[in-house]
Image (tube, helix red, strand yellow):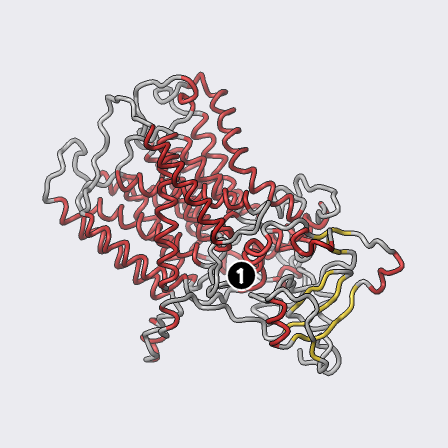
Amino acid sequence: MLFDLASWSVLIPMAFAAGRGALALLGAVHLRAGDRFLAATWLGIVLLSLSLLAVSLVAPLTIGLTLTVGMTLAATGLAIAGVSRPAPSRRRPHTDHGTPWWAVAIGVSLIGVGAAALASDPVTLYDSLVYHLGVVQWLHEHGTVRGIALIHNRLGHISAWFTLGAGLSVDPVAARTATVPLGLALVLVGVQGSVACGRIACRRALGADWFLALSSAALIWAVLMYNAATPSPDVAANALIVVVAWAMLVVPRAGSLVRTHGWRRWLGPRLIPFVLAVGACTMKLFALPAALVAAVFYVFARADDRGARDAAVRAAVCAAVGAVLMAPFVAANLLASGCPLFPSPIGCLTTSWSIGVDRASDYIAYVRDVARWESRYSASRASDLPWIGQWVAAHPVVTTLAVLAPLLAPPLLQGPRRDGLRSALLLAVCGITFVAWQAPAPRFLYAFVIIVPALAVAFPLASVSSRSLRSVIDRSSAPSASAGFLAAAVVASLAFAVASQKLNVRSALTSRAAFLPRRSSLVLPESPAPPGRLYQWRVNDVAVVTPVPRPIADTLGYRSTIDGDAGFEKCSTAPLPCTPYLPSADVRLRLPERGLSAGFVRGVTDPSASTAAMRCVGELDAASRSMLSLGATTPQTSASSMCGGPGGRF
């Protein structure tokens, strides 16, 4: 837990400093203090993760390199913020609730402790043990590797979010830092909910504040129900989608009314949601509708903001900004799988390291089927009956929220005209439609389905409860703001703690189990459980390990019939390269003299050797695993079992 807290105490200031420069560059000079912190920190996280992804194209993500990139971004941001001077404005900025610094410090500390309890838990989720931890490990040891998807399809899922965990890996917490970014997202979700609740408590809340409070509560509830630590970018992508919708409500009047000239004319606060949404896309592609709607939000700005006649120029600016931000993500995907938007087959190359259009198409169809049918076994029977009825029965809450979106949107559109409201509604409806069509997993839909109900409740509550914003804040509002901020922080911290496996809150309440965690877990994150058994194979000149025994290993694919939380397939923190199923017999090292870092390609140079391209070496014992972790290429194997064959234990 202490390691997580220390990591966040470094990452958050660096991200805030970098994001502060972005806000200054985009002319967001009239954001309230809390809004400025949230927008700047999320922007900084996007910039840091994308910068690290760009660096991973040429170098492994060590902690020294990560700190160098972060400090460079922070220094640049502070320099930009220092030289940027806001132009005079006739607009009077909204006043903030004025929560005292001591209340903010206590509240953030409480949120951090709860988030650290959850984020430092051992990773137990299936997908995380199959490939999330592996991607983080590859990025740390080798950077983005050419053709890595040939070893295992899912290793082609290169996410900017993974770079934050990869760059923090250092002894004695190597292979334990993958979930540190999860806690970072949880802290920010808790803080943004607390900021909004502080404003609500002192009756200074706008509709955007009520929306932020309600949507943050919904995100925290999802984390509580998920009840697991994971390096998956799903939590961060969902949080960013909500922040994009919130930013659309607060940024239209964040800039100056005074016209600027030159290139600064085209960089306005309306670009903030777009930058955040593109950042979410580089973490998880289901956020794509948010980026498209955010682009519309910027391009078709109201005439009193930048002028409707300049929409074509703004479209070009938007395209240029999007291209620059997406470049590291597209390059990393092209390098890893040969497909620019993997697992989408669109634009897949025909190079020797590419998995190809056919395999990518088959894989994305599998992802869609699993999202519809919830399991591979059910997906294999997908023709037996329609998937919608089974899906609705399995997810009644998400279904209800999704149905409410088109029902609540028309009344909101007929209400008072509010900047950004229509764009936020469009974001939700487009997101629900896109995800339901592509891969309707609840974790992909969740952020989109909570937006419209939260908006429908937020603005009526703001109209009823808030005072006039023209009044001057009096000293009596500070105690109310402090109480609201601290109360929300306590709730968020307790929710994270209850979701933690470490604190055993649920077990303590139900079975009188020990509440306090082990002393060692208070300092360092828990280590994921290693695979029970590992077997080594030779595929041409590639030595791979797999937790799956023979004869399953040489026939297992991502369309396997193994269903549920099986003990097979989980590479966890096994030495690289580990794969839950063996790669094709034609996969080999691209440059054998450079090893794994040079990547992999297809093609057997000697056709007569194809029948002997794959062979079992044997089962690895504990000493052999340690040798592989230290870089050995030919460890000793156990003679007692040849990869779990005859006489082996399955």
Rendered location of residue 465, percent (x, y): 19, 42
Tell me where residue 85 sits by quadrant. top left
The local crowd at label 1, few if under 14, some if 14 to 19, many if 20 or more residues have their Cα within 10 Å, is: many
450 w.r.t. 470: above or below: below
Tell me where residue 571 sits by quadrant. bottom right
359 w.r.t. 612: above or below: above
Q: Is residue 411 visible?
A: no
Q: Quadrant of the C terminus?
A: bottom right
Front residue of 218 and 272 = 272
551 w.r.t. 324: above or below: below
Tell me where residue 344 sits by quadrant. top right
**Is residue 598 rendered to the left or right of residue 187?**
right
Q: Quadrant of the N terminus?
A: bottom left
- The residue drawn where x is 36% and y is 57% is 6
Rendered location of residue 247, percent (x, y): 36, 37
Rendered location of residue 197, percent (x, y): 24, 48
Q: Is residue 424 visible?
A: yes
Please give the residue where the numbered disc 1 appears in the rendered image: 128
Label 1 amino acid?
Ser
- The residue drawn where x is 63% and y is 41% is 340
**Is residue 528 rendered to the left or right of residue 531?**
left
Q: How many marks?
A: 1
**Is residue 176 rendered to the left or right of residue 497?**
right
Rendered location of residue 51, percent (x, y): 50, 42
**Is residue 360 rendered to the left or right of residue 271?**
right
Front residue of 75 and 38 = 75
Front residue of 571 and 619 = 619
Helix, strand or loop at label 1? It is helix
